[in-house]
């Protein structure tokens, strides 16, 4: 029961992340293309296009980091895990996941504080004059998403380790 609820939440989060990344990437690409055509063919560019594209890419980096983490797509050095026995490899994965979770928690905290400071100053973007904190919000949102994905990895790795010891299935299965 609980496992199916977590699986549905995971699918919903995955769909939201992938949808956001797809729409933001398409929007940035189309906007850049249109602006290049306007600039070089009609000698008139959209003044706000570069700013919007840059901020979309900032959001893409942080939300896309979570998507990449979910798919185990980040670069990693696998020399040590390959040299370890399965139990040692699991322990290493648990340690690395715990360290990542601590990092994402600290990054969430400090980027959240920074975002609140920017919000308090009332800083605006140069061209659109939109609140600058909306751009900075990508950091705590992205670190929260990556923290959730890391917690999932940690839980599944720990569950797999306890399964091996007890021979029973867990919610992660």
Image (cartoon, helix red, strand yellow):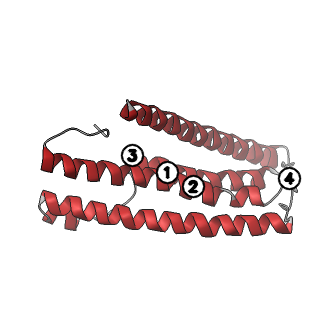
Residue 66 is tagged as 1
CA gap between label 2 and label 3 equals: 15 Å
Q: Residue at x 82, y 66 (%)?
A: 120
Q: Mark 3 highlights which residue? A: 71
Q: Which quarter of the rendered picture does the N terminus lie within? A: top left
The 10 Å Cα crowd at callout 3, few under 14, some 14 to 19, many 20 or more, is few
Q: Are marks 3 and 4 in contact (CB under 8 Å)?
A: no
Q: Mark 4 highlights which residue? A: 47
Image coordinates for residue 114, horizontal then vertical, percent: 70, 69
For residue 150, above or below residue 88: above
CA gap between label 4 and label 2 equals: 28 Å
136 left or right, relative to 9: right
115 left or right, relative to 17: right
Front position in the image: 92 or 158: 158
Of callouts 3 and 4, the N-terminal one = 4
Front position in the image: 142 or 162: 162
Q: Mark 2 highlights which residue? A: 142
CA gap between label 3 and label 4 equals: 37 Å
Image coordinates for residue 141, horizontal then vertical, percent: 61, 54
CA gap between label 1 and label 4 equals: 31 Å
For residue 85, above or below residue 7: below
For residue 30, above or below residue 97: above
Q: Are marks 1 and 2 in contact (CB under 8 Å)?
A: yes
The 10 Å Cα crowd at callout 2, few under 14, some 14 to 19, many 20 or more, is many
């Amino acid at each position: 029961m609980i496992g199916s609820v977590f699986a549905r939440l995971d699918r919903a989060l995955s769909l939201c992340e992938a949808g956001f990344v797809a729409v933001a990437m398409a929007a940035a690409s189309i906007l850049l293309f249109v602006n290049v055509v306007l600039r070089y063919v009609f000698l008139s560019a959209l003044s706000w296009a570069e700013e919007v594209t840059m901020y979309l890419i900032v959001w893409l980096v942080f939300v896309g980091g979570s998507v990449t983490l979910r798919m185990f797509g980040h670069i990693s050095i696998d020399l040590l895990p390959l040299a370890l026995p399965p139990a040692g490899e699991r322990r290493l994965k648990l340690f690395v996941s715990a360290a990542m979770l601590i990092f994402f928690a600290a990054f969430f905290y400090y980027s959240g504080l920074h975002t609140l400071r920017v919000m308090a100053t009332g800083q605006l973007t140069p061209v659109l004059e939109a609140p600058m904190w909306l751009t900075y919000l990508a950091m705590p949102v992205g670190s929260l998403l990556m923290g959730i994905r890391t917690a999932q990895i940690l839980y599944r790795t720990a569950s797999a380790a306890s399964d091996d010891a007890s021979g029973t299935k867990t919610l992660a299965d």
